[in-house]
């Protein structure tokens, strides 16, 4: 188990890069491998990781799109 949310976030980001899977799938895979419920790791999901998951869900049209500024 991880001591901080940042350690968990770094581990999940490493899984995403290595396995080329979405963030939510990496979190669910971690839960499956460690016999945890997703609610058990919810406290380890920091704002950075949450933003990345939200972006994936918007890309999949699970959440409404937001206006984007072209800069």
Image (cartoon, grey):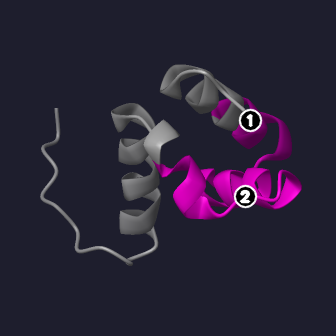
Q: Nearer the viewer, residue 48 or 17?
A: 48
Q: Which residue is mark 1?
A: 17
Q: Nearer the viewer, residue 27 or 31?
A: 31
Q: Tell me if residue 8 comes above or below residue 42 in the rendering.
A: above
- Answer with left or right where residue 40 lies relative to residue 55: right
Say the numbered circle drawn on residue 36: 2
Residue 56 drawn at (x, y percent): 47, 59
Image quadrant assignment for residue 19: top right
Image quadrant for the N terminus? top right
The span shown in magenta is 13-42
Measuring 46% from the left and 53% from the top, which residue is drawn there? 53
Main secondary-structure element of the magenta-colored stretch: helix
Image quadrant for the C terminus? top left
| Residue 21 in view of the camera | no
User: Circle 1 — which element?
Assistant: helix
For the residues bearing labels 1 and 2, Cβ distance under 8 angstroms: no
Residue 26 drawn at (x, y percent): 71, 51
**Magenta stretch: residue 36 in it?**
yes
Q: Tell me if residue 44 comes above or below residue 35 in the rendering.
A: above
């Amino acid at each position: 188990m991880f001591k901080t949310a940042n350690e968990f976030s770094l581990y999940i980001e490493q899984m995403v890069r290595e396995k080329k899977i979405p963030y939510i799938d990496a979190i669910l895979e971690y839960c499956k491998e460690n016999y945890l419920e997703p609610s058990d790791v919810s406290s380890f999901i920091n704002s950075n990781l949450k933003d990345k998951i939200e972006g994936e869900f918007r890309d999949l049209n699970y959440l409404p799109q937001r206006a984007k500024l072209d800069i």
